[in-house]
Amino acid sequence: MPHNHQKKIAVINDLSGFGRCSLTVSLPIISYLGIQCCPIPTSILSNHMGFADYFFDDYTDRMEGYIEKWRGLGLRFEGITSGFLGSKEQIETVIGFIEEFGESGTKVIIDPVMGDNGRIYATYTEEMCGEMRKLIEYADIITPNLTECCRLTDTVYKEKGWKEGELYAMAQKLLEQGPEKVVITGILQGDFVASYVAQKDKKPKIIQVHKAGAERSGTGDVFASIIAADAVNGVGFEESVKKASDFVREGILKTMELDIPSTDGVCFEEILYTLKRD
């Protein structure tokens, strides 16, 4: 069909008008990397929930009607990716979308956004955590941070002091659940932040970048967007993780230079041109 002459990624996430996260991050980054970014909004927010006040409109009941129109257009996707999901029903909708639109060559990238700094988000129930385990069974690639990795593998969280054998054990548990590739992000190692990269039938690798500043909203969305676009473009996984890690760090440095509040995310717009298009 004429609609399917260009590579497309369906991105299922919320739309926050301000704060540089979720769809407002994915749209420009995936587009810059030469792929049409097709959003499915799970909710609409004036600004993300890290702010004291925000407008919020839940889209759970409207997602199926939205997807129905895509069904009528006969759309096909080279990639499907999801980020923060606000309910069990939304996770079930994503699973249904993957089952229907995920073809043999479609890359499925799941960012299991469940928590950070050792805590699961208050909105995440035990039932939702169980559903997320089901969702990652459909993934080719997952990008959990350390908190999410521990929750998905029933491992006790600790902030630092991770041995490579411990990371290996968690990564193997995740690979056994279905994904072909896993990157565990946010591992503190002295003056570095590391990502543990694991792939089926391949030796794992630790990729480090120097720490830069404090944590900021939306860095995970920036990272996952690059990983998703690179997967569709055929970029090697380790190369992609290194690219995404370096880009996030440079974005944080630019954001610090401009004295931007942490709630406002990463000024990736200033350095978007540095992303190599493959």
Image (cartoon, rainbow, N blue to C red):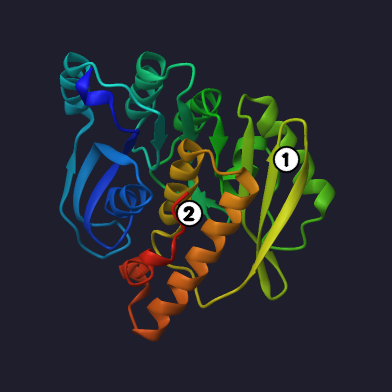
What residue lies at 29% left-to-right and 40% top-to-bottom? Answer: 36
What residue lies at 71% left-to-right and 63% top-to-bottom? Answer: 160
Q: Is residue 120 visible?
A: no
Callout in the foreground (2, 1): 2
In three-dimensional space, the C-alpha distance between marks 2 and 1, rounded to whole angstroms, equals 21 Å
Decide: is 69 above or below 228.
Answer: above
What is the secondary structure assignment of the residue under circle 1? helix
Identify which amino acid the numbered label 1 is placed on. Answer: Met
What residue lies at 62% left-to-right and 24% top-to-bottom? Answer: 178
Return the mark for residue 161: none
Q: Which residue is mark 1?
A: 170
Front residue of 181 and 271: 271
Left or right side of 167 for 97: left
Front residue of 10 and 137: 10
Left or right side of 47 for 190: right
What is the secondary structure assignment of the residue under circle 2? helix
Return the mark for residue 223: 2
Where does residue 199 sit, x and y in percent of width and height?
70, 36
Left or right side of 174 for 125: left
Where does residue 53 sit, x and y in percent of width and height?
20, 62
The quarter of the rendered structure image containing the N terminus is top left
